[in-house]
Amino acid sequence: MGAVGTRAVCEDLARQGHALIELERGSLDTKLWKDVKRKRVRIPDLVCQRCGIRVESRAKTKPELSMSHSATDAMRAWDFGMVDSDWIAFPVCVAAAEHDWSSGRLGPESSYWHERNWVKWEAKPRINYFEV
């Protein structure tokens, strides 16, 4: 869902004259990274090549302005690694299609069962932007 929302932010800001590229690896891709990812390093997802504005995308399923935050650990604050001029985008995504999937087998001494719910996400057309 996050990648779908970030792509929607790129498209929306491109219509307004911005040329965005990724700052945070994997922001525009749904691939799960298997390589080691640095922990506790927060940078915005996108940067505009034309004006330098940095954008953090926070896709939501409900139109709520919420981000995780810790008042006791500065590195876990909602705005850690960001500057006042950075933007935060809140695209709202809805499930366009859902499919359940399962696989498994029963054995005499053990069994294995795996279930998944595959969701195709779509971003709503309007995106809210706020400065940090």
Image (spheres, rainbow, N blue to C red):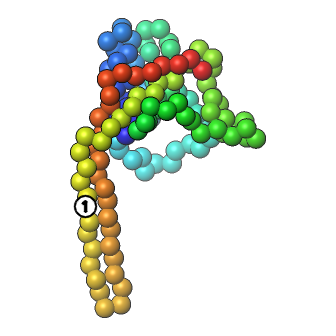
Q: Is residue 16 left or right of residue 120?
A: right
Q: Write down the quadrant of residue 2 in the picture.
A: top left
Q: Residue at x 63, y 29 (%)?
A: 79
Residue holding disc 1: 101
Quadrant position of the N terminus in the picture = top left
Q: Is residue 36 left or right of residue 102?
A: right
Q: Residue at x 28, y 83 (%)?
A: 106
Residue 13 showing in the rendered view:
yes
Numbered label tally: 1
Q: Is residue 55 left or right of residue 101?
A: right
Residue 37 % position (x, y) = 52, 44
Quadrant position of the C terminus in the picture = top right
Q: Nearer the viewer, residue 15 or 63?
A: 63
Residue 126 % position (x, y) = 36, 21
| Up/down of 20 relative to 76, above or below | above
Q: Is residue 75 left or right of residue 102?
A: right
Q: Residue at x 43, y 13 (%)?
A: 49
Q: Nearer the viewer, residue 87 or 65?
A: 65
Most extreme residue toward the bottom is 108
